Amino acid sequence: MKNIYITDLDHTFLRTDLSVSSFTKEVWNSVAAHSIVSIATARTYKKTVQFLGGVDLNAPMILLDGALIATMDKKIIDTKFLSKEVADAIIDEGGKFGIFPFVLALADKNLNELFLHSNILNSDQKKVLSRYSKDDNLRECGNIRAMDNNFKIVYFGEEELLRKLSLHLEAIFGDTLKYILAPEAYVGCYFLTLLHKDADKSHAIRSVSEYVGFDLSKLTVFGDNFNDIGMFELAGISVAVANAQEGVKKAAKIVLPHTNDEDAVANYLKGLNGGY
């Protein structure tokens, strides 16, 4: 039975400048030759493919926090959408707090994605958008409304505001949604993500394991943030990078001495042959 390795991207596999070093590519691809390898990320299909040029994957990718499972060649394995009705209701409730979200949605069956945002933005949202300024899927909305098939709704802002909003939404929607509130390391604020209740990395890993046919006890996962804890609990071996959130380190079986900028995942994989 082959070993399986699934890694988070941002602040785990990717360096802070969003690159993948030649060392990491070499080590990862050598492991891919005799193992099952893939990624689990909050990123979209488009961004993931853009970042992973030259990186071998031989199992479906877990994208958008588990709301989408797809292969590199755009074969959709599974989706977990928020309906337009539910997404619009979330948008309306957020508006009561003076904040409007980003909406990531499916544009068509060819896996093209839309990134919708309001023309009313806080300073943190403006900083986030500046990182996507060259993307062609951005759509500014005077009165933001959801699409028919929405992967997730994301708010960026101050922790206190987003905690209040999260509690407010939980009181309304209960366990029909998945709520992720965590620090945003690139901009230095917090983000609140709303997803279908089964859109998470652990549910997605189970789907991938059924599709590919692998034993979860042979699975090693790598991560840094709170949306990785679900897959930590599922995998035979869970590995946190040195720059991971403290709560994530406590949930991991192994905490690495290297950060994402020090090729933590690759150093771990290389060390398996000679001891780490």
Image (cartoon, rainbow, N blue to C red):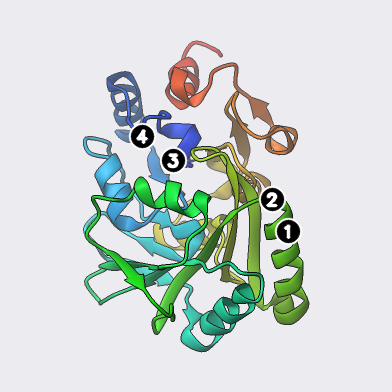
Per the model, the C-alpha gap separating discs 2 and 3 is: 23 Å
> Mark 1 belongs to which amino acid?
Arg
Depth check, mark 1 against mark 3: the one in front is: 1
The one nearer the camera, 178 or 204, is 178
For mark 4, what is the residue? 18
Position in image of residue 208 (x %, y %)? 45, 58
Does 189 appear above or below 266? below
Circles 1, 4 touching at the beta carbon (< 8 Å): no
Establish if 2 lies above or below 234: above
State how far apart marks 2 and 1 are (Cα): 6 Å
On screen, residue 176 versus residue 101, left or right, reads right
Q: Gap between marks 4 and 3, in whole Å?
A: 9 Å
Q: Secondary structure at mark 1?
A: helix
Q: In which quadrant of the rendered view does residue 255 lie?
A: top right
> Label 1 belongs to which residue?
163
> Residue at label 3?
9
Is residue 1 visible in this depiction of the protein?
A: no
Q: Mark 1 or mark 3, which has the lower sequence index? A: 3
Circle 4 SS class: loop
Q: Which residue is mark 2?
A: 159
Q: Position of residue 61 (x, y in %)?
A: 38, 53
